[in-house]
Each structure stands twice: as structure tokens, then as C-alpha cells.
Image (spheres, rainbow, N blue to C red):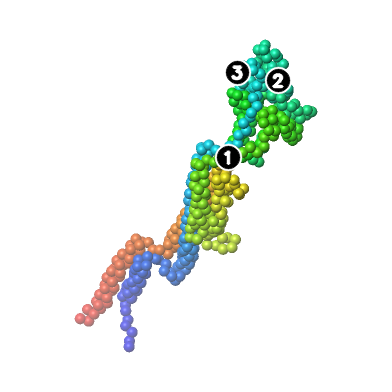
Amino acid sequence: MANTILSSGVRNNLLTLQQTTAQQSVIQNRLATGRKVNSAIDNPVNYFTSLNLNDRADQLTGLLDGISNGIQTIQAASKGIDSITNLVKSLQSTIKQAQNDAAANRPKIAGTADLGAGNATFPPAGSKLDVALNKKLIGTAGLAQGDDPATAGDQSSVGNVGLTAATGTDSNAIQIKAGTTVYTFNLAAGATVRDLVNGINGSGIATASVGNDGKLTVTGTGSDPLTIAAGTATTAGVFSPVTTDTDKLFGTGTVIAGVTAAGTSSVRSTLVKQFNDLRDQIDGLARDAGFNGINLLGGDLLSITFNEKTGANKNKLDVQGQTITSANLGIGMAVDGTTTSAGDYNIQNDNDLNKAADGLTNVLTSLRAISSTLGSQLSVVQTRQDFTKNLVNTLTVGADNLVLADPNEEGAKLLALNTRQQLSQTALSLANQADQGVLRLFG
């Protein structure tokens, strides 16, 4: 079959029309897919670069789930610490209630000796308190410097209680014991009963007073057995009791040892269960502060990965939890009577209540420290979460910029190609008409 021969004009216009149609097909494919690079054939550099960027973005997106779970785990622990803090404050309130109710078992040493005694006319009736407080402690007991009671009018010198003066470098001293707490203070050579009272009151474990009857009374500030003795102390602080001198202060016994008081406060007794129930709730709350199987208040380890790398280039944060229990926090049990464990509190004992109050204050300090640490770690994880989200967005946008088509630009191109196609068809038609003009020559 013979080949059909086209004129040069028709062939050129036909070629242009074919090229325009091919370009239209490319533009239409871009508009349909939204991408200007659909395979490595279109642009190998952009295609594989975009592929790598999207792959990293996908890996980081997967890590965001773990980061989010990590945030929730830390927040669960932080909320647990907040709730435990409130329970500890409730424990403090219980201790304060117990302290507000006066202890019924404070030991008391009531003296029988009238420290202001002289004779029937000296000192005058009704002034024994002042006389007793101003009496010197050390020296021979007596009236006003041996004055005749019938004529003595000078009450500025009221004699001595009669404590034996220390010899050598030793000092006269008083020692008080409350349970295991020992307090010793020295007496100056000219010390008075007033100085003795002030010294005992400064001990913190007992209070002293002299009544209008001139008798000395010492009461424990807590419930521990109370012991008091007069004696001497060396320069090294070694105390030696002098039994007869204690007898002169109180008028009975020698060294007053282990004085206790019976009785309990019913109000305090009712607070024992309240305290221990709150203590148990701390343990239960700490056990319930986990998230997704990890409990930072139960000593678990939380590991949060921040990047897709491995080995030395891997970036992660390990959050080591702490085992939070009432025992670990140092909160002992409340007991209504003698304690059986070193950390327990006898709710009837003021000293134990003071220890409990101080201990709970320290517990709050520890909880604030734990809360601060969790807050700092939470801030780090949240910052990394925001960074990862922004990085994923940056990677995705960067990948899209390499392969996505601009619909406005591609639409304008398609419109131009449609116009060119129409013009090419018109030109082809004109070229055919020019070829048909030859036929007229044979007409």
C-alpha cells in the first residue's frame, strides 16, 4: 500500500496538535492527582527526597503516641501527689485536733516543802510566793541572816533553801529527764528559786511554778515519765545527783525518778482510727496513680523516645518513679497507748504529737520536691511534643513542596493548552484548505 504523503504545513500543524494533546494529558493528570511528581520518572531527585521526608514524618508521628502516653503517665502521678498532699494536710488537721485537747496523762511532781517558810511571824502571811521566789538556792537554810524573828523587818534577805554548794571547779546543776530527753542547766552561786523556775521552764520538756503556799510544782509538757534531780556538773558537763538536795526542793523523796500520770483523753482516742484510715488512703491512692500500666508512684520506670534514631543518636527521657507509701514517707501509725514500733505515735503523748506534726511538715516538703521534679519532667516532654508536631509539619510541607502541583498554575496551563489546541486545529484546517486549492487547477 502506498504511503500517504502529507504536505509540510499539514505535518507541522499535526505535530503541534499532538504535542499540545500530550501536554494536556500531563496537566490533567496533575490536576487529578494533585501532584506534579507522581513517580521517579517525573523528577527522580524530588520524588526520592519527598519520599524520605514523608518517611521521617511518619516515624515521628508514630512517636507522638508514645510521647502523649508519657505525658498522661506523668500527669497521673502528679495528680496523685497533689491528692496525697491533701491527705497529709488532713493528717495534720487530725494531729492538731489531738493537740487542742489537753493531755490527761501529764506527769506532775508536786512539792511538799514550803520554800518560803521562816517562822510564825516571818515572813508575813500571804507573802510566801514572793519570799520563795527570791530565796537563794545554795547555802545554809535559815531566816534573814540570823535576825531575830521578832524584830526582823528587812525582807530583802530571806535566807537560803539549803542546796549544798559545789566544790572545786564543779557547778551546782539541775537535771530533768522526760523519756529519753535529758536537759541539764547550771545554777550560779547566787541563784534564786526564781532562776530555778526559769531554768526548768526553758527546758521545753517541763514547766515549773511556785504556788502561794510556797511549794514548787513541776509538770511535764508531754506524757513521758518525768525525772528531776539536783546535783553538780563538771566542766565537761558530767552530772552527778545529790539526793538530799532534791529532797530540799520538794520535801519528799530524793531523786524524783520516773513520775508518770494515769488517764487518757477520750477525744484523742477517737482520733486514732481517723488518723490511720487517712494513712491507709495514702497507700491506696499511690497504687491507683498509674496510667497504661506504668505507675511512677509505684517505682516504675517511664522511658519516652523523642526521635527515630537508634544507638548513641537516640534521644529519650527516662523518668524513674518512686515508691510512695505512708511508711516510705515516714508517717507512722497512731496508737492509743504505748508505742510498739519506733515510728508510731502515741496519741496520748504530747511529745509524740509534736514529733508527728514535725514529721508531717517534712513529708509535705518531700512531696513538694517530688511534685516539682514531675513538673519539670512534664515540661520537658510537653516541649518535645510541641517540637515534634512542628517538625512533622515542616517535613510534610517540605515534601509536598517538592511533589505537589499548584492547581491555579496547572489550571492556567490547561486553559492555555486548550486555546493552543483550538488554534492548532484551525491551522491544520487552513493547511488542508491550501492543499485543496490545487484541485481547482484541474477544474
Residue, disc 1: 262
Q: Residue at left 51%, top 38%? A: 101
Is residue 327 visible in this depiction of the protein?
A: yes
Amino acid beneath label 3: Ala
Residue, disc 2: 142
Q: Please, which residue is most extreme toward the top here?
A: 151
Check disc 1 and report its element: helix, strand or loop.
loop
Q: Is residue 300 above or below residue 205?
A: below
Circle number at residue 125: 3
Q: Please, which residue is most extreme toward the left here?
A: 443
Q: Quadrant of the C terminus?
A: bottom left
Q: Is residue 4 above or below residue 405?
A: below
Check disc 2 and report its element: helix, strand or loop.
loop
Q: Residue at left 52%, top 40%? A: 265
Q: Residue at left 25%, top 77%? A: 436
Q: Is residue 145 above or below residue 405?
A: above
Q: Is residue 434 above or below residue 123?
A: below
Assess disc 2: are there few (<14), some (14-19) or many (≥20) residues with their C-alpha within 10 Å of its C-alpha: some
Q: Residue at left 62%, top 16%? A: 124
